[in-house]
Image (spheres, rainbow, N blue to C red):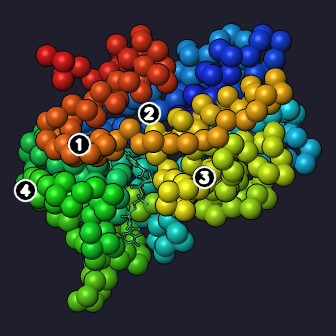
Amino acid sequence: MVLGGGYAGLRAIKFLQRQLPKEVELTLVSDTPIHTEKTNLHEVAAGTIAPNRITFEIESVLQPRVDFRVETVMKVDVDHKQISFASGDILPYDYVIVALGFKSESFGLQGAENALPLDSIDSATRIQSAVEQQVARYAKSKDPNDLNVVVCGAGFTGIELVGEFTKSLPKLAAKYNTPAINLTCIEMATHILPMFDQGLADYAVDYLKQKGAKLLTGAKITAIEPNAVVYSDDEGEHRAYANTIIWTVGVSGSNVIADSGFDQRRNRVVVGEHLNMDAHPEVYLVGDVSAVMDPASSRPYPTTAQISLKQGEIAAKNVVAAINNQPQTTFTYQSAGTVASLSDTNAIGEVGKMKLKGYPASALKKIITDRSLLEDANLRTMFKKGRYDIYH
Ligand code: NAD
């Protein structure tokens, strides 16, 4: 059984349906019938693409032999080898791959409910419509906060979202004939995009500032009020007022992990090199609900789509091996490169020793998006929903 229809879960079930004989029963469980290419959520949130460009029906990529259930998982009971669902149903398993993904994390911050998280297609759509509604409202309200948008956190998600907003907010202001919309991003760290070479990170920051975004660094958010973000820096406490506040300060794994009584941190379970639990080798955990130690850094690998995909495949391969009494494969990972988009025509990226910025990096991001659609779905979906403006 595979739990979750995200990057890791879908990759796993597609491997299993190809590799296992028909007599083996396969079940995929997801709380939604739709797969979302979540690395593109920021584009939907900013309103630069329609939601259906980054989603597809999970069933469209499954063989008829797979029992696909749209159900909410409540608990993985490893002692009784069964899964409990919100519907009250219980299903037994012989092997399970847990790939239940991430959710936005508020770290118990006071007033977090006043901010919009960005972790699903629905939350991205909510952000898009909240921003548009407040800009539309400005004509009557004349409330300056209707023209203020604040993004909390300048991690990968925050920066990519700010980049898209620098493109879409001026269009929105023109559509509703309002003064310019103010975009502010508030980040606790003093150094943005630390995973990139300093020159590339500086390029990204300069570009976003030049496009009108205000980036506040060394600014720790301490509370969110209905119309303001409270933050502290060297000079004391401040408020950034806005009627749309978006929350991208970090993620944790699915709550099912803690609810299942697993030994976990931020709903991530440390698994070994074969991606399963020592005490329950028939239970594999992949993607954002797992933490796999990177021998090179002695720290867990980061939570990225690229790593989730590879883990989904290795876990599925190991289930096939276990069924056939063959040895398990060790998870190893070599990054194929990292790209952060700044708009539809600008990005920064590192691939091996190569450093890219501007249009070439953005073209690379589109190739990654297209390849992801091809591999997660199929050629038809890639043709329908892919990005082709780099090819002419
Ligand atoms: P993140 O944890 O990477 O970034 C959150 C940011 O919020 C950090 O910079 C942190 O310093 C800041 N922050 C936290 N608490 C704060 C506070 N109280 N006040 C101010 N700032 C605060 O989270 P994310 O950006 O949502 O990314 C989640 C994961 O997904 C990461 O592993 C990321 O690498 C990955 N991701 C990858 C890609 C990609 O590869 N293109 C895109 C998006 C996300």
Would you place residue 230 above or below residue 138 in this image?
Answer: below
| Foreground disc of the pair 1, 3 | 1
What's the residue type where badge 3 is placed?
Val
What's the residue type where badge 4 is placed?
Gln
Secondary element at tag 2: loop
> Camera-side residue: 67 or 269?
269
Q: Tell me the residue that label 3 is attached to.
A: 292
User: Residue sitting at 44 percent across and 54 percent down?
Assistant: 117
Secondary element at tag 3: strand
* Label 4 to label 3: alpha-carbon separation: 39 Å
What's the residue type where badge 1 is placed?
Met
Secondary element at tag 1: strand
| Foreground disc of the pair 2, 1 | 1
* Disc number placed over residue 37 in the picture, else none: 2
For mark 4, does the 10 Å Cα neighbourhood hold few (<14), some (14 to 19), or many (20 or more) residues?
Answer: few
Question: Looking at the figure, which quarter contains the N terminus?
Answer: top right
* Disc number placed over residue 210 in the picture, else none: 4
Dot 4 or dot 2: first in sequence order is 2
